[in-house]
Image (cartoon, helix red, strand yellow):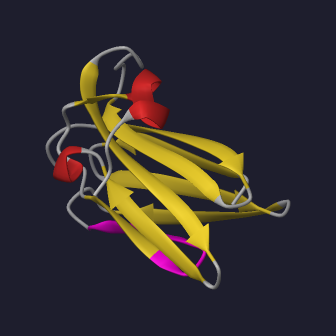
């Protein structure tokens, strides 16, 4: 996956745009639908958007390591308001773990030093 863009156009729709190997796909969801990203065969549930518009960040460190973060739109990377996940490819398996059990309490800028389980 090269890029993920999440855009909340209006309260009635959310557009998730995923670009992989130069091919772009758009997924339109209603805000109360749960959005699940698939990364290397593993599913990452990023929840629904009924409470607040959500910003998404991704950091593709290597072929085997990526970080994903979600927070309210306008959040800065240094604020402790992020839900952060780490996706690691080990052999044929993709392992997805979350910092602090997936709570929106993490600092995106600290993603490489966080404890994931």
Residue 57 vertical position relative to residue 107 in the rendered view, above or below: below
Image position of 43 (left or right of 100) = right
Judge left or right: residue 15 versus residue 4.
Answer: left
Q: Where is residue 33? Give x, y as percent.
A: 26, 67
Image coordinates of residue 76 in percent, x first then y, are: 39, 16
Is residue 18 found inside the magenta-colored segment of the image? no
- Left or right of residue 54: residue 5: right
Residue toward you, 82 or 15: 82
- Using residue 90 as the reference point, say whether residue 71 is left or right of it: left
State whether the magenta stretch is mostly helix, strand or loop. strand
Q: Is residue 1 visible?
A: yes
Residue 96 is situated, as x and y percent measured from the top left of the image, at 42, 65
Residue 93 falls in which quadrant of the image? bottom right
Please state, as top left, top right, bottom left or bottom right, where the C terminus lies in the image: bottom left
Residue 18: x and y in percent read 63, 59
Q: Is residue 36 magenta?
A: yes
Please give the name of the residue rendered at 20% of the width and 61% of the height, measured from the top-left corner. 32
In the foreground, 83 or 71: 83
Residue at screen point 55% across, 42% down: 58
Count the marks.
Answer: 0
Residue segment shown in magenta: 34-42
**As drawn, 94 above or below 116:** below
* Residue at (74% x, 59% y) in the render: 63
* Between 32 and 108, the one nearer to me in the picture: 108
The reply to whether residue 37 is visible in this rendering is no
Furthest-bottom residue in view? Answer: 92
Q: Quadrant of residue 25?
A: bottom right
């Amino acid at each position: 996956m090269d890029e993920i863009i999440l855009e909340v156009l209006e309260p009635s729709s959310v557009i998730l745009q995923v670009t992989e190997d130069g091919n772009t796909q758009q997924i339109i969801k209603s805000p109360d639908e749960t959005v699940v990203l698939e990364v290397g065969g593993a599913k990452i549930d990023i929840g629904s958007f009924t409470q607040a518009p959500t910003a998404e960040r991704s950091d593709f460190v290597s072929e085997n390591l990526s970080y994903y973060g979600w927070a309210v739109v306008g959040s800065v990377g240094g604020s402790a308001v992020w839900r952060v996940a780490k996706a690691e490819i080990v052999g044929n398996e993709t392992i997805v773990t979350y910092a602090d059990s997936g709570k929106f309490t993490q600092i995106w800028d600290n993603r490489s030093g966080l404890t994931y389980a």
